[in-house]
């Protein structure tokens, strides 16, 4: 699904030189090539307008993780196809999650926590930077599983459902325990890691640490895209880190790059769409409706958490609707 190593570095350096049509062309075959950390992995410009989905297969090692921060959606891909998505929590504004390419090299059940040398740790009573806090210690906030992403960034257990869709951590991704168990076990099964079901069950039932090392790193792509055209439908997500991404000019550019004719669409219409997005909602509308000047009539606000659903055209009295 993703090119790695030198190819990624080359594509990053040349991203501004590659036209949108070339991006879509790379969406075929083995999946799509990622080289823009501000473009959702679900964008039609990368997928060609179609995301293939498939059941998970054990023993198929070509897996990747992606996360678009504004949608709070972590996705597991296998052989370029979507296997499953989960809702997550991410880093606070003052401690944002890293945007860009990361790698996971191990999965750890009942992990130790080593507090980083950070101001928030120094301000936490009873915790010292650099000390090893074991899984059995109530001061350990990581829960039952952690997946290190390097440089102190982690995927680990959420405190509860209230973490999902929120800015709650110090630069980490938080998942519900059942979801984290499922993800961890899929990684083990895909890569045929030498960890047995009995060992995993024992780790779940105890505080004993279990480590599954990945011989080949697992790519993790973290992006920040608030304006996503997926399957011919525009999704506007809240700009949770206040990066100034939700503006009428940027929205117009995104629609043009996706092939929409928006020459006759007034800025007021675009601004009305953007204004419909709140901290916990997204705005959903077919791109075809925008080109017809019906964005606000046909679009709708939806709860932020939830899988994207195609927007439906509203029926009118002229067509027999009520």
Image: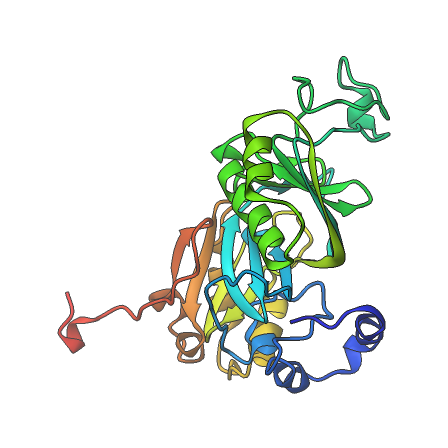
Does residue 36 appear in this view? yes
Please give left or right for residue 277 compared with residue 27 in the image.
left
Where is residue 110, by image quadrant?
Answer: top right
Of the 4 image quadrants, the one containing the C terminus is bottom left
Residue 127 sits in quarter: top right
Residue at figure coordinates x 69%, y 70% from the top left? 2
Instruction: Give the image location of residue 144, x and y in percent.
Output: 60, 32
Above or below, 53 relative to 85: below
What percent of the width, then of the height, locates residue 107?
A: 68, 44
Q: Residue at position x 20%, y 71% from top?
A: 316
Residue 127 lies, with reference to residue 103, above or below; the image says above
Could you say which is closer to the camera, residue 199 or residue 111? Answer: 199
Residue 101 seen in the figure:
no
Residue 242 appears at what percent x and percent y? Answer: 66, 49
Residue drawn at x 75%, y 29% is 113
| Image quarter hosting the N terminus | bottom right
Q: How is the image coloured?
A: rainbow
Q: Residue 48 at what x, y percent from top left?
A: 55, 81
Foreground of the two, 114 or 24: 114
Q: Residue 78, located in which quarter of the rendered image? A: bottom right
Q: Is residue 279 above or below residue 4?
A: above
Residue lying at 63% horizontally and 63% vertically, measured from the top left: 63
């Amino acid at each position: 699904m993703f090119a790695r190593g030198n190819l990624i570095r080359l594509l990053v350096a040349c991203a501004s030189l590659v036209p949108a049509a070339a991006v879509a062309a790379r969406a075929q075959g083995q999946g799509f090539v990622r080289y823009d950390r501000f473009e959702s992995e679900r964008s039609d410009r990368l997928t060609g307008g179609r995301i293939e989905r498939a059941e998970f297969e054990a023993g198929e090692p070509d897996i990747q993780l992606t996360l678009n921060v504004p949608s709070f959606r972590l996705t597991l891909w296998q052989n370029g196809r979507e296997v499953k998505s989960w809702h997550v929590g991410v880093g606070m504004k003052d401690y944002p999650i890293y945007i860009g390419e990361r790698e996971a090299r191990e999965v750890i059940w009942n992990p130790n926590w080593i507090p980083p040398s950070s101001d928030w740790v120094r301000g936490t009573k009873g915790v010292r930077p650099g000390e090893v806090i074991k899984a059995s210690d109530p001061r350990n906030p990581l829960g039952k599983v952690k997946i290190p992403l390097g440089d102190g960034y982690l995927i680990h257990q959420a405190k509860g459902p209230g973490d999902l869709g929120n800015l709650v951590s110090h630069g980490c991704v938080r998942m519900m325990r059942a979801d984290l168990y499922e993800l961890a076990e899929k990684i083990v099964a895909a890569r045929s890691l030498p960890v047995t079901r009995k060992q995993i069950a024992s780790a779940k039932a105890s505080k004993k640490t279990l480590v599954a090392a990945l011989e080949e790193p697992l790519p993790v792509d973290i992006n920040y895209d608030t304006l996503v055209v997926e399957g011919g439908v525009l999704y506007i997500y809240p700009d949770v880190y206040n990066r100034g991404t939700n503006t009428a000019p940027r929205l117009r550019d995104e629609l043009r790059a996706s092939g929409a004719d928006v020459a006759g669409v007034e800025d007021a219409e675009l601004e009305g769409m953007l204004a419909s997005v709140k901290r916990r909602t997204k705005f959903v509308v077919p791109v075809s409706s925008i080109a017809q000047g019906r964005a606000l009539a046909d679009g709708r606000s939806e709860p932020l958490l939830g899988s994207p659903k195609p927007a439906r055209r509203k029926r009118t009295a002229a067509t027999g609707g009520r």
